[in-house]
Image (cartoon, helix red, strand yellow):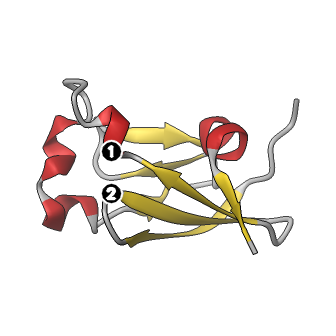
């Protein structure tokens, strides 16, 4: 399945991100369940969490070279925002 590409991301309250895709749909994704995994544990630092950006090409959101979430995961498991 082809997923739409990410055009913007913003850290919102809690450990949630709001993601906008290139088909104009917006979804929110709760990162908190991932924070117990070693790869994502640095995101417990709120300043780092809020530094989220869209990866080049819109295929993921990234915090640094080690922490990212794919567009597929965000599209499939994010909640639609009206």
Secondary element under disc 2, as helix, strand or loop, is: loop
Graded by Cα atoms within 10 Å as few (under 14), some (14 to 19) or many (20 or more), the crowding at tag 2 reads some
Residue at screen point 66% across, 54% down: 79
- Cα–Cα gap, marks 1 and 2: 5 Å
Residue 37 in the image: above or below residue 54: above
Proximity of marks 1 and 2: CB atoms separated by less than 8 Å: yes
> Mark 2 = which residue?
15
Secondary element under disc 1, as helix, strand or loop, is: helix
Q: Is residue 50 left or right of residue 68?
A: left
Residue 64, position as x, y percentages in the image:
28, 48
Task: Name the quarter where the N terminus is drawn.
Answer: top right
Q: Quadrant of residue 16?
A: bottom left
Frontmost residue, 54 versus 30: 30
Residue 9 in the image: above or below residue 78: below
Residue at screen point 32% across, 57% down: 15
Residue 9, position as x, y percentages in the image:
52, 68
Task: Name the quarter where the C terminus is drawn.
Answer: bottom right
Q: Quadrant of residue 77?
A: top right
Frontmost residue, 6 versus 40: 40
Residue at screen point 70% across, 45% down: 75
Q: Is residue 69 left or right of residue 11?
A: right
Question: Residue 32 — which label?
Answer: 1
Residue 81, position as x, y percentages in the image:
69, 69
Q: Quadrant of residue 24?
A: bottom right
Residue 8 in the image: above or below residue 38: below
Which residue extends farthest top?
38
């Amino acid at each position: 399945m082809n997923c739409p590409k990410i055009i913007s991301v913003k850290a919102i309250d809690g450990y949630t991100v709001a993601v906008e895709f290139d088909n104009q749909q917006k979804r929110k994704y709760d990162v908190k369940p991932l924070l117990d995994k070693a790869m994502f544990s640095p995101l417990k630092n709120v300043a780092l969490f809020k530094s989220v950006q869209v990866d080049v090409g819109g295929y993921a959101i990234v915090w640094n070279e080690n922490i990212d979430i794919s567009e597929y995961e965000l599209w499939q498991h994010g909640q639609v925002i009206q």
